[in-house]
Image: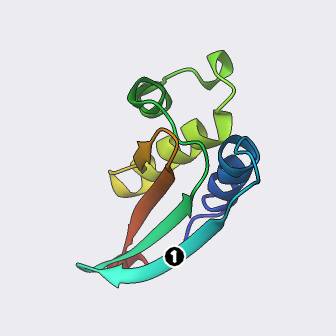
Amino acid sequence: NVPPLCVQPLVENAVKHGVLRKRGGGTVTISIFEKNETIKIAVSDDGVGMEQKLIQTLLDSSDPKNYNGIGIINTNRRLIQLFGKGLTIESESGKGTIVSFAVPLHTL
């Protein structure tokens, strides 16, 4: 099973920080597919994107209280605890963001 509350904060962040900040809005897409003995789940948007420094802050943060991206930080930490690997974030300023994670098939 996909751990509870792993997809929801990714979708919320894509809407709030991605497409709502883009003039004219945008699109959020949830993709789920099997790849290399895992189920990969990706939330992508065509919003405003993020700088690499912010991505590193989100993925390296040990104290979510110091940053308002608590949903991403907690999701990343939970995935690392469960599967040994957290979120992957790919983003380009002005073009959008893809946040993904993999769940090993043997855990389903």
Instruction: Report which residue position mark 1 lands on.
Output: 31
Residue at image coords 70%, 45%: 22
- Residue 39 locus on image (x, y percent): 40, 77
Residue 100 in the image, given as x and y percentages of width and height:
45, 59
Q: Is residue 35 above or below residue 88?
A: below
Q: Is residue 63 left or right of residue 13?
A: left
Q: Quadrant of residue 2?
A: bottom right
The percent position of residue 70, horizontal first and vertical second, equals: 66, 34
Number of marks: 1
Horizontal side, residue 74 vs residue 35: left or right? right
Which residue lies at the image location 49% right of the left edge and 41% below the top edge? 77
Name the image quarter holding the C terminus: bottom left
* Residue sitting nearer the eye, 36 or 42: 42
Q: Is the residue marked by circle 1 packed among few (<14), some (14-19), or many (20+) residues within 10 Å?
A: few
Residue furthest to the front in view is: 24
As displayed, is residue 87 above or below residue 104? above
Q: Visible in this render: residue 78?
A: yes
Q: Amino acid at mark 1?
A: Ser
Q: Residue at x 41, y 23 (%)?
A: 53
